[in-house]
Image (cartoon, grey):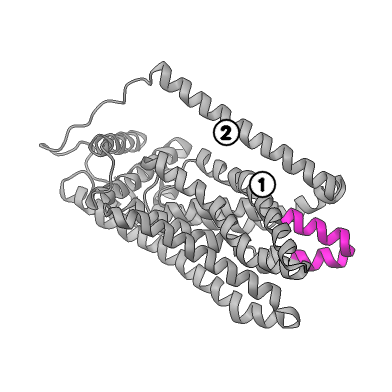
Amino acid sequence: MTWGHGQEYAAEAPPAGAPAGVGAGSTASGRSRLRGWLLVGLTVVGFGLAAVVLAVYYGGTLGLVTTLLALVLAAIPLGIVIPTFLWLDRFEAEPVRYLVTAFLWGSLVAALVAGIFNTGANIAFQAATGREDDALLATAVFSAPLVEEASKGLLVLLIWWFRRREFDGIIDGMVYAGVVAAGFAFTENIQYLGMAYDSGGDASLTGTFIARCLFTPFAHPMFTVLTGIGIGIAATTQNRGLKVLAPVGGYLLAVLSHAVWNLAAITGGAGMLSVYLVVEVPIFIAFVALVVWARRREGRLIGRHLSEYADAGWLSPSEVQMLSTMNGRRSARVWARTSGGRAMLRSMRRFQDSASELALLRARMHHSAADTRALETERELLEAITASRRDLLGAY
């Protein structure tokens, strides 16, 4: 049976002597379900309260019409930034509910916390210096990077700490960090765009939109991704020192890059274009190169660790080749869709997703960084792969 380009699927059944699969996990207890519902309820209430506070603040300071105009314009960069991180996440997509939570955390909780602390810092700096301009500069260079990167990075840290089975390493850290930062930038842009419109009308609004939404839409994600990388390293190591130093180091690099960016933007003045070309463009190019490298690295990682299962007979070499490249995965999905419609496409996606999870789990096991349920999860994923292949063979 072929999926395209003359490659064949492996046999449906696992080889003799291979580890036997286990059944699905037992039904969650009533207490566990209650804890889950309480967590969901607290999350919804927390996000709701933050949204109300921000809405009241923007409505009171900017007015309803200006806020809505700024909101629409601030949403435009999301059409660039979010798809970039979803593209990065294609090999092993994160649960949608976690990505939505990350965005809401950035746009509501992190933005609210940063606004409170930065306002307090600005008041303190102004009282100490007696100069408004110096206070704004100190807030932008010292307070904002420290507070904003901490409030954004905290969500990535919480996901790794409490949902380790969904956190596979550097790519996951980058994706969650990027989505959180995109949400934060969205809310921050509402404020800057609204203030620009109030103070300078259409001309000021246009200039702010071009500068913040078109020229530098990846500013916040570029900083917070460094924290995500540090947490991703911690997720794939058993070294206790590195588990602490990597997230802290990533956070400090995020703060430093954020501070340098803000300093360049504020002090650029008439030479802002030069600052943009000399400082900001090279940083963005380095960020793009990092994203491309990280995705290619994950493909190689998947291929390397799935080869171990091919050697044991669970997968065929052609399947490993298909699963380790996005072109191969895309071709397989096109084949599934044309051969068996949506049902077969769903089976192919389940097959690919389960295989990716298996490879990344194997990578954590290789580094002794997997949790105590790793072997059980491995068997469940092998069983899911076998079931998906059975569906594909039956549809064919």
Q: Quadrant of the N terminus?
A: top left
Q: Quadrant of the C terminus?
A: top left
Secondary element at image label 1:
helix
Camera sees residue 6: no
Vertical placement of residue 218 versus 286, above or below:
above
Residues 103 and 312: in front is 103
Residue 7, given in percent of the width and then of the height, sits at: 29, 53
Q: Residues within 10 Å of mark 2 (few under 14, many from 20)?
A: some
Residue 112, disc: 1
Give residue 324's quadrant in the image. bottom left
Give the Cα separation between the discs numbered 2 and 1.
Answer: 15 Å
Q: Amino acid at mark 1?
A: Leu
Vertical placement of residue 267 versus 188, above or below:
below
**Is residue 108 found inside the magenta-colored segment of the image?**
no
Q: State yes or no: discs 2 and 1 in contact (Cβ < 8 Å).
A: no
Residue at horizontal 36 percent and vertical 20 percent from the top = 27
**Is residue 205 found inside the magenta-colored segment of the image?**
yes
